[in-house]
Image: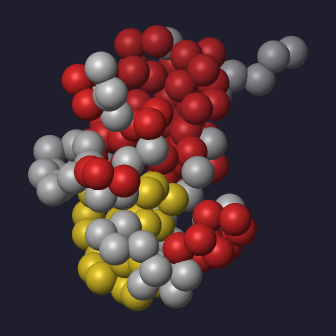
Amino acid sequence: MKRRFSSAAAVACLVVLAAAAPKVMLRDAECFIGAAFAATIASTQQRTPMQAYVYKSRRKSDTYVYLRERDGFGLIPEPLRASLGALDFVLELALTPDRKLAQTDPAVAHANLVERGFHMQFPPHDAPSWQLDDNDGDA
C-alpha cells in the first residue's frame, strides 16, 4: 500500500529541502504538490533576504568580497584568496532583489552567494573581460 503525505507534511519536507539544496527544491516540490504551488514557494524564497558580509581587499584597491558566512574565507578559492591579500570587514547587509548596490547587481551577487558562497566586486576599470558589457570592450 502506498503511503500518502498530507499537504502540511509535503510543505514541511519542502522547507527542509529548500534550505539544503535550492535547485533540487523546485523539482521535488513539483512531484509532491504541483508546479504552481512549487513556483510560489520558489518565488517567496527569492524575496527572502540573505545576509551578506562584505570585506575589502588590502592588496587590490576598490575590490570587495561578499561572503554568505561571516569570516567564511574558506569559501574563496585559494589562488583568488592569495591574490587579494588580507581582507578587512566592511559591513553586513541584507541582500534582497530590490536592494541597490553601487557597483554590482544584487541578483547576480545573490546567485553567486547561493552557488559559490562568495561574490567578487571589482573596480570598473579592473573588471575581467568576461564581466564587461559589449559597449565596454575594445571595439
- Residue 96, x across and y down, in percent: 24, 50
In the rendered structure, the answer to whether residue 138 lies left or right of residue 10 reads: left
- Residue 127, x across and y down, in percent: 38, 48
Rendered position, 120 above or below 16: below
Q: Which part of the image, by quadrant, shows the N terminus?
A: top right
- Residue 75, x across and y down, in percent: 63, 65
Q: Which part of the image, by quadrant, shows the C terminus?
A: top left
Rendered position, 128 above or below 87: above
**Would you say residue 54 is visible in this rendering?**
no
In the rendered structure, the answer to whether residue 100 lies left or right of residue 129 reads: left
Quarter-wise, where is residue 131 in the image? Answer: top left
Most foreground residue, 4 or 81? 81
Rendered position, 41 above or below 97: above
Most foreground residue, 95 or 62? 62
Q: Residue at x 71, y 68 (%)?
A: 78
In the rendered structure, the answer to whether residue 55 lies left or right of residue 134 reads: right
- Residue 85, x across and y down, in percent: 55, 81
Q: Residue at x 53, y 25 (%)?
A: 26
